[in-house]
Image: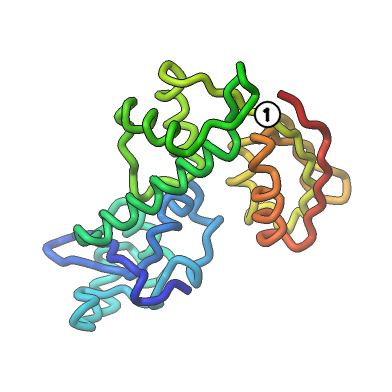
Amino acid sequence: MVSLDDAVLARFEHGGKRFEILIDPTLVDSFRNKPESVELDDILATEEVWLDARAGERPTSEQLVNAFGSDELYVCVEKILIKGSIQLTTEQRKKRVKDMRVAIIHKISSTAIDPKSKMPHPPSRIETALDECKYSIDPFLSIDRQVNDAIKLMRPLIPLKFATARLAFRIPGVEYGSVQSILRELMIKEEWLQNGDWACVVEVPAGSKIDLMGDIAKRSKGSQVKIMDEGS
């Protein structure tokens, strides 16, 4: 569960009422893409829907049913996050954009090379190219998604080449929902096995394979992975 200090407001308006929840901004993109991939305990700072979070004012069950069709917490949270707006203060937005910018630059500089020299680009060169292509950082999109978007704009400005790795994952069927949204974006092929396990092959930048393997291992305790090959 995210701390109150790190949480931001998500807000949805209906029938003249404003409904709010306190959330972890780093999980907004994952939730919007695949709500079932994110646990409520992870994204919420408090397991409450508020009329005014700062004042501690709660809605009635009737008000929730009128606005969301249900007073069930998950139903309300899903609608607020998908159809509502995320409220960041100016300072929160600046800090988040700054932190994400550093992460994007690090991610690209640690996985990309100059195809002529076969050497990595220094972070300062990546930062300059990011400025030149005028890429606008979104404080709510995932780092990986923004890295891919930024690279498309940077390629005409700077030579980039990425070594890739193919990984074969085997996931217990009961844990499929916790990882599929991550792996499907990278997937080359998949297969459901006779015992109910889900198997897939993904391709990622070689420098990202350890991070991906660690992420999947956290989400799926019964997962198995094999590095198939690494190329250029």
Q: Which x, y percent locates residue 201?
A: 75, 36
Q: Provide the residue designation for mark 1.
A: 163
The vertical placement of 93 against 167, above or below, is below
Residue at x 53% of width, y 37% of height: 109
* 149 and 66: which is toward the camera: 149
* 179 and 79: which is toward the camera: 179
Q: Amino acid at mark 1?
A: Ala
Chosen colour scheme: rainbow
* 217 and 32: which is toward the camera: 217
Q: Which x, y percent locates residue 204?
A: 66, 35
Name the side, left or right, on which 165 lies relative to 76.
right
The vertical placement of 182 against 205, above or below, is below
Q: Residue furthest bottom?
A: 56
Residue at x 43% of width, y 37% of height: 124
Q: Quadrant of residue 131?
A: top left
* 72 and 150: which is toward the camera: 150
Q: Check disc 1 and report its element: helix, strand or loop.
A: loop
Q: Quadrant of residue 162?
A: top right
